[in-house]
Structures are given as C-alpha cells and as structure tokens.
Amino acid sequence: MGADSAQHQQWSKPVACLPLRWLLAGLLLLAATAPASAWACPAPTIRTHALALHGAPRYGADFAHFDYVNPGAPKGGSITLPALGSFDTLNPYVLKGISPASFSGLYGITQLNEPLMIGTHYYLEAGDEPQTAYCLICTEIEFPPDYAWVTFHLDPRARFHNGDAITAADVAYSYELLMSDQSHPIFHNNLAAVDKVTISGKHQVRFHFKGGPERSNLLRVGELPVMSRSHWEKHRFGESSGTPQPLSGPYRIGDFVLGNYITLQRVDDFWARNHPVYQGMFNFDRVRFEFYRDRTVAFEAFKSGAVDLWLENVSKNWATGYDFPAVTQGRVIKEAIPHSIPSGTQAFFLNMRRNQFQDRRVRQAISLMFDFHWTNQHIFNGAYARNQTHFPNSEMGARGLPSPAEVALLEPHREQLPPALFSEPFEFPAYREPGDLRQAMRRAIGLLRDAGYRFQDHRLINRESGKPLRFEILINSPSFQRVLLPFTKNLAKIGITADVRVVDRAQYKVRLDDFDFDMTVYVLPQSASPGQEQRLYFHSGQAGVRGSKNFSGIQDPVVDAMIGHIISARTRPQLITAVRAMDRVLLWNYYTIPHWHLGYHRIAYKNIFGRPEPAPPMTLGFQTWWLKAAGAKPQGTLD
C-alpha cells in the first residue's frame, strides 16, 4: 500500500471479480462474443477518514480529540481581539473588496465556511502534523491508487445554521463559484487540477483530476469551503457584500459594522459540536474583533484594557514597550512561546515587470546594500536571525552545496542557471567589520557598471536610456520606515534613489493586486510541506494574474520545472529535494531580498486565559484557549 497505512485506511474490494479458473473457462466459451474488458477486475479503491501527504495520519478513525487540546476546557465568556485595517465585505472568496478574514485569522476565521476536511492550509490546522486532513463535512473519502479521482461521502447530519442540509449539490456549486472569474485567483490555483465534478447521490460527490497522479490534489480539494447553493443563487457572488451567508461551523456572524468591528457568536447546537476535531476548540461564547487603522492606536487600546490579547511583531516594542502597570502588576502576561512553525517567506519583492529590475546584476547590487547585521543590532535589539532561504526555520531551506539529488533535478537546466549555483553555497553577506560594507559597495558598483550604468552628478544613469536608477518601496506600516531608512541611505551612497511610500491597508491591497509597485514588503505563508501554493507564489503562469502572489513577476522556466517536481513528489525526501532546488534558483537570481525570522511567538495577554500545556508545535493554537472564569458547559452528542 506504499504511503497508505492499513491502520487508518481500508481497501474496497471489487465484488464482480471472478476466480481465475472461472475466468479462464469463461474466456474459452465466450471469447468470440464478449469483450475482454468485461472480465477485467477493476482496481481496488481506498476508503479513509483522513489523509496525509506523506506517510500515515497521526490519528486513527476512532480518535476522540487532538492530543494538544483540553477536551474538558470550560466554555463561556466573551473576549475582544484587535485587527488592523478595515473591511468592506463579508465575502472572503472574491478579489473585490477587503474581508475581515484578511486581518483576523488569529481566531480561525481565515475562511468562514467549513471545508470538506479539516487540516493543514486551512483555518483549523492539525497543530502537530504537517499536510494532513481529517474528514469534517465528509465521513470518509474514497480514491483509487492512481489518485485519478476522489469521492467525498458526506455526513448526512451536516447542516448550515439555517437548518438546510449540506448536500453534494452545495459542494459542486461551491466549486463552480470558486472557479468562476469572480473568485480570488488563489482558488483557481489550488483547484487547477480538477477536470470535472460529478454527483452520484445526495451525499456523494466526486472530483476527477487531469494530469499525472498527484496525491496532493486530494488535500487541495479537501480544503474546499462549502457554501450554500440556495443562498448564492439569490445573491451576486462577485460583489462586495454586507449580507452574511449561512455558515455551518462553531460560530455565526453576530452584530457588525463594516470597517469597524465584527462579532462571532458561538452556536451551541451546531451540527458538529461533538466532532473529534472540535473537541477542546473554540471555547468562547463571543469573540469581537475591533478594527484599528493604526498599529500604535491598537497597542494603546491593549494597554488600556480595551482588547484582551496582543501579538507583537515589532522587536523594539517587545524590548521596551511593556513596562506599563498591567504588566508589572501581573494583570497582563508577556510571554515568548517557542514553536516549530516554518517561517513565512518575508522579503523585499522586486517587481521585474519594471525595466530597472530585469537585470540580475542590478537585483544583486541592490541586495548587497541591505545591511541586516546593523539593522538587527541597532533596530531589532539583536532579536532576529537573517533568512538565507525562502523557507526559514524549516528543513526545506537550501543549505550548503546542492546535494546529488538536487543536482540531478537542476542539471538539465544548467545553461539557464548561474554557474556558481553548482559550486558555491549561497549566503547573504554579514557586515560585521567597519570595512565590510565599503567592500560590498565597491562590488555593487562593479555589478551596476557591468549592467550598463554610469555615475553622473552622484546618480546612476543608464547609458542607453539616460534614465536614473530610481524606484519606490511600497509599505503599509509606518513603523517599517525605520528599517528602510538605513537601507535607502546605503542605496543613495552608490547612486540609487529609493523613495518610501506608506499607504493604508486598503490601498496597499489594491496596489498589490494590480502589481502597481516597484518594490514591496510581504510575507508569503509557508507550511512544513510546501506544495501547490508555490505555483501561486513563483510560477510564470501567475505573473500576469491579477491578485496572484507572484509579486516579483517571476517568469523562469527552471522555477516552473522545480515547482512541477514539488507538486509531483511522492515521498518526503523527494519533496525536500525539489523545494531546496527551487530555493537555490530563486536565491541565485535575486528575485527577492529575504528578511529575518523568529522561532517563537511574542504574545501578551490579560491574565484571564487558560491554555493546554504544552502548546502545539505547529500553530499558536489560540482556538484551544479558554477563560479561567468560565463555567464548564456540556458538549452534547451528535445524534
């Protein structure tokens, strides 16, 4: 059975398969009248409650709850959480508008609708295993060994909050909505391998795949959020909407004011209240998100007690900003919680749709002017480690020289790659000695001279166009200007003018969707098992798709080929090899300038919460917290 474990999965044996002696006798008698296919045994299928991309799921079909939760956690009470920015729609699945899910994923509303399966890459992650999903709206999935299709057997008890049953028709209609030209392109990418969807009963829906056998397709389809067909047949899907749609999970949308706040109200009798994946989860009766346009104002709201929890992402504030009375008196707890979560790809993204960034030597010269060591010591209080990869804090990141397995993948493309990729470890320089930065400047000037630039009046001028080398860095956080100031000063010393443009979050989203920037700062989320999402981030097919995450506009056939190897990897060693090979291609071409990372959560919260110990290694797990003063309430049972 290969990667499929008999502990968690079972074969479905064909009932029409005849014994061999009967088959031979039948062939002698009926060969002239019956086609051979009439006697062939269909391939057995696999039926299972869960699926892991590589290996077996951690939890068997009879599991009661995840190991990292407290299944007896008390339920009750209300909390208020901060969210930065604004929102003008309650539909998180379309490109138009800004949804609250964009800013308030802390408590699990990255997607509002329950998916077919719960697991990685979704709003409720399995916090102790990568790329694994468990049936939620389905009771089991069924698929052949070649992964040509997958059938979801739906739970007949599944209901939307309005009482409507969740049916195969709702699933198929949700797929049609997400593949329409009105939906966000992330869904077009994730569901690109689906050829068609067929319904074989009220509670059975099958997804047929095109292309080669890829196990990851089953996981991507399992993430599909299931929406109400009857609702969306009456409303326009592609428009920004202030009308809540019927949901099916532990919370419904309560009161809200677009742009200001939104409240989630727990549904005590929702259909899956006793499902194993929900035990010990979502323990607050009411969760209110207050939206703030300014981060400083939001932090002051936390200090004053208006919100109950704060995730800190500014190292200087973490070092110096927590001397207010609530902390010193123990009413607020400041805590660093270690984790094993792969850090996202946080970087400066150079937009190669702009002419000045199309030359690799220019991109490399610009990267040399980012003095991380100085920034870390003087601005970050030495808190961070420099990212030398697009996959920091993960075994997926390239390191040292390429392995023989990586070389085997890259060798067919040798002529399209920098020769140093095969002979030198990649590393961004650290300027620890006084003369290090000056040497880097001389090197950068040499690269720019080779790229066709000359000095004139303290500026770099392109010899052919006569235009100066100048660009704008687009950000949405005023506090990030302190990071950019020394970077732009270093650029100015070699004749490059870099202007900083700060915009609000709404304008930032629109400009990123339209690729209307020269350079920007962003964080691409990464998992412990990278997959189809790498296509959205780096594949040439996404470079011209409005709203995609290929911010650098990468159109590199070698990157495309490595992404193909990532998606088709059958074992974890194959996946690691393919991701590292792609990482090397990205690094040596200087498509981005990677930033820095931490190996722990910086969090401060009122001393009102209880939480399981130890924390789950692969997520913060705030969905498992509870209020210490809340009274325990029975979970009930699934009828």
Image: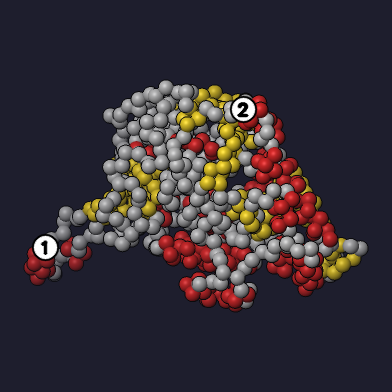
The answer to which of marks 1 and 2 sits earlier in the sequence is 1
Q: Residue at x 57, y 33 (%)?
A: 333
Q: Quadrant of the N terminus?
A: bottom left
Q: Looking at the image, which residue sits at the far front?
A: 329
For residue 53, which quarter of the picture? bottom left
Q: Quick check: 39 left or right of 79?
A: left
As helix, strand or loop, the secondary structure at mark 2 comes to loop
Is 484 or 218 nearer to us in this picture?
484
The x and y percentages for residue 387 are 62, 58
Crowding at dot 2, Cα within 10 Å, few <14 / some 14-19 / many 20+, comes out as few
Residue most toward the right? 457
Q: Which residue is mark 1?
A: 19
Q: Amino acid at mark 2?
A: Gln
Mark seen at residue 329: 2
Residue 379 in view here: yes
Counting other residues with Cα less than 10 Å from the Cα at mark 1, is it few (<14), some (14-19), or many (20 or more)?
A: few
The circle drawn on residue 512 is none
Residue 294 position in % (x across, y down)? 70, 35
| Residue 174 visible in the current orientation | no
Q: CA distance from mark 1 to mark 2?
A: 79 Å
The answer to whether 505 is drawn above or below residue 582 in the figure is: above
Name the residue: 63% across, 55% down.
Answer: 385
Q: Amino acid at mark 1?
A: Pro
Above or below residue 174? Residue 484 is below
Under circle 1, the secondary element is loop
| Residue 271: percent from left, percent from top | 35, 30
Residue under the image location 51 percent in, 24 percent down: 78
Q: Residue at x 74, y 50 (%)?
A: 378
Relative horizontal placement of residue 53, taking residue 378 as reference (left or right)? left
